């Protein structure tokens, strides 16, 4: 790591690729001869319009997004989408949520404010340590949409098989696994991702929505800003967008394309995750908490024999230059978030430290 940087295992805001940060740093005072920083220029200027258009075009190429889908850049992060999804997709029927962790649980609670939302499947019985099997479940006839959180950051689980919805729109919160592996967008009605985990700075969500789900016949009291159609009709420029986050995300999209795209990212991410999970599987001191078949490639949750030892380990890791290994406050334990930007060397260094720590404490 250069510039005195540490290995940052934060779940978000998270690491960004160093080459991207270097390019941003070189442009921060004067963006490509404009005489201005991106943080200073008008969002209506031709210079920024090109930044926005290039970002969308590169994302479409990365994900092979069909022409029948719109790409929206919306302020507010992923949590705002917990409300926008039901506000825009309820049609008087039922919304079926797969409750696989803390974030899908919160999204379900929010959806209940706007219509008949239910837990179609849940893994709460085992503290969200696995992804529920939906293969034998039947959807109610009046289901408006099915909702999943495709990667649960807090509990460290992910979907490797999407639920079969038989034509009912599938909505996925991809915040913590966005662009980490190839994605067949045509299988979804709507994908959203808060960008601060695996793409760029906090404060924005990317929404990829199929054209037929963009409606104008919403409840009259639905706020203008919370209507997908408003953002689609205005190319995400209805109001001043999060210019800085959009600019930085665009840099990351281009960087990923130059590395080889999403197949290459999946290869790298599987390699990194295997290093850490293999160590945990053979450790007598550290133990992974997620079911093996559902383990996240992005967020690795594990524990020591006791909460007290968890805290001691976090302190020792910080002193050794490994930051943000403390688990989420709602579940405790430990967590290493190894998003796209985390280099393999960072995971190798963490595994070596875990091994030394175990040998010193057993």
Image (cartoon, rainbow, N blue to C red):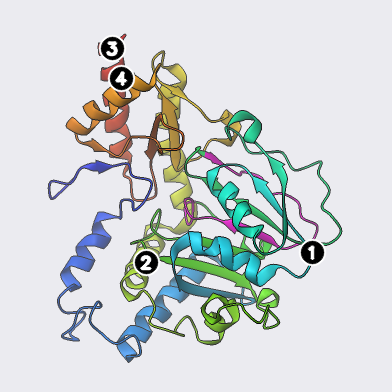
The earlier-in-sequence mark between 4 and 1 is 1
Residue 62 in the figure: left or right of residue 294 = left
Q: Which residue is mark 3?
A: 361
Quarter of the image with the N terminus is top left
Q: Nearer the viewer, residue 301 or 1?
A: 301
The earlier-in-sequence mark between 3 and 2 is 2
Q: Which residues are magenta?
A: 157-180
Q: Secondary structure at mark 4?
A: helix
Query: Taking 85 as reference, is 30 above or below it?
Result: below
The earlier-in-sequence mark between 3 and 1 is 1
> Residue 67's x, y, as percent?
61, 77
Q: Which residue is mark 4?
A: 355
The earlier-in-sequence mark between 3 and 4 is 4
Residue 65 seen by the camera: no
Q: Nearer the viewer, mark 3 or mark 1?
A: 1
Tell me the distance, in whole angstroms, between the alpha carbons under discs 3 and 4: 10 Å
The earlier-in-sequence mark between 2 and 1 is 1
Quarter of the image with the C terminus is top left
Q: Nearer the viewer, residue 239 or 278?
A: 239
Q: Which residue is mark 1?
A: 93
Q: Is residue 245 magenta?
A: no
Tell me the distance, in whole angstroms, between the alpha carbons under discs 3 and 1: 56 Å
The earlier-in-sequence mark between 2 and 4 is 2
Residue 342 in the figure: left or right of residue 163 = left
Which label belongs to residue 249? Answer: 2
Tell me the distance, in whole angstroms, between the alpha carbons under discs 3 and 2: 42 Å
Q: Secondary structure at mark 3?
A: helix
Q: Secondary structure at mark 1?
A: loop
Tell me the distance, in whole angstroms, between the alpha carbons under discs 4 and 1: 53 Å
Q: 10 Å neighbourhood of mark 1: few (<14), some, or many (≥20)?
A: some
In the rendered structure, are the residues bearing label 3 and label 4 in contact, judged by CB atoms less than 8 Å apart? no
């Amino acid at each position: 790591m250069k510039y005195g940087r540490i290995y940052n295992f934060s779940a978000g805001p998270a690491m960004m690729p160093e080459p991207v940060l270097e390019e941003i740093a070189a442009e921060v005072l004067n963006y490509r001869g404009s005489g201005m920083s991106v943080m200073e220029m008008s969002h209506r200027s031709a210079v920024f319009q090109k930044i926005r258009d290039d970002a969308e075009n590169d994302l479409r190429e990365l994900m092979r997004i069909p022409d029948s889908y719109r790409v929206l850049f919306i302020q507010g992060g992923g949590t705002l989408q917990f409300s926008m999804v039901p506000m825009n997709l309820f049609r008087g029927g039922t919304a079926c949520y797969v409750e696989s962790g803390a974030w899908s649980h919160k999204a379900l609670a929010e959806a209940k404010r706007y219509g008949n939302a239910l837990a179609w499947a849940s893994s709460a019985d085992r503290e969200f340590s696995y992804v529920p099997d939906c293969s034998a479940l039947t959807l109610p006839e009046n289901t408006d949409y099915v909702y999943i959180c495709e990667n649960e950051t807090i509990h460290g689980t992910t979907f490797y098989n999407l639920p079969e919805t038989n034509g009912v729109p599938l909505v996925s919160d991809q915040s913590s696994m966005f662009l980490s592996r190839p994605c067949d967008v045509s299988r979804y009605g709507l994908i959203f991702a808060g960008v601060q985990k695996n793409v760029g700075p906090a404060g924005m969500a990317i929404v990829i929505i199929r054209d037929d789900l963009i409606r104008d016949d919403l409840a009259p009291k639905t706020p203008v800003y919370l209507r997908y159609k408003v953002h689609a009709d205005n190319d995400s420029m209805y109001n001043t967008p999060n210019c800085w986050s959009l600019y930085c995300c665009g840099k990351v999209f281009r960087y990923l394309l130059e590395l080889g795209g999403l197949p290459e990212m999946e290869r790298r991410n599987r390699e990194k995750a295997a290093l850490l999970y293999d160590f945990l599987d053979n450790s007598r001191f550290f133990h992974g908490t997620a079911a093996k078949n559902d383990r996240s490639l992005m967020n690795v949750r594990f524990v020591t024999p006791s909460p007290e030892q968890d805290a001691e380990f976090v302190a020792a890791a910080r002193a050794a230059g490994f930051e943000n290994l403390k688990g989420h406050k709602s579940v405790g334990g430990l967590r290493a978030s190894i998003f796209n930007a985390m280099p393999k060397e960072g995971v190798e260094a963490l595994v070596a430290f875990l091994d030394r720590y175990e040998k010193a404490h057993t």
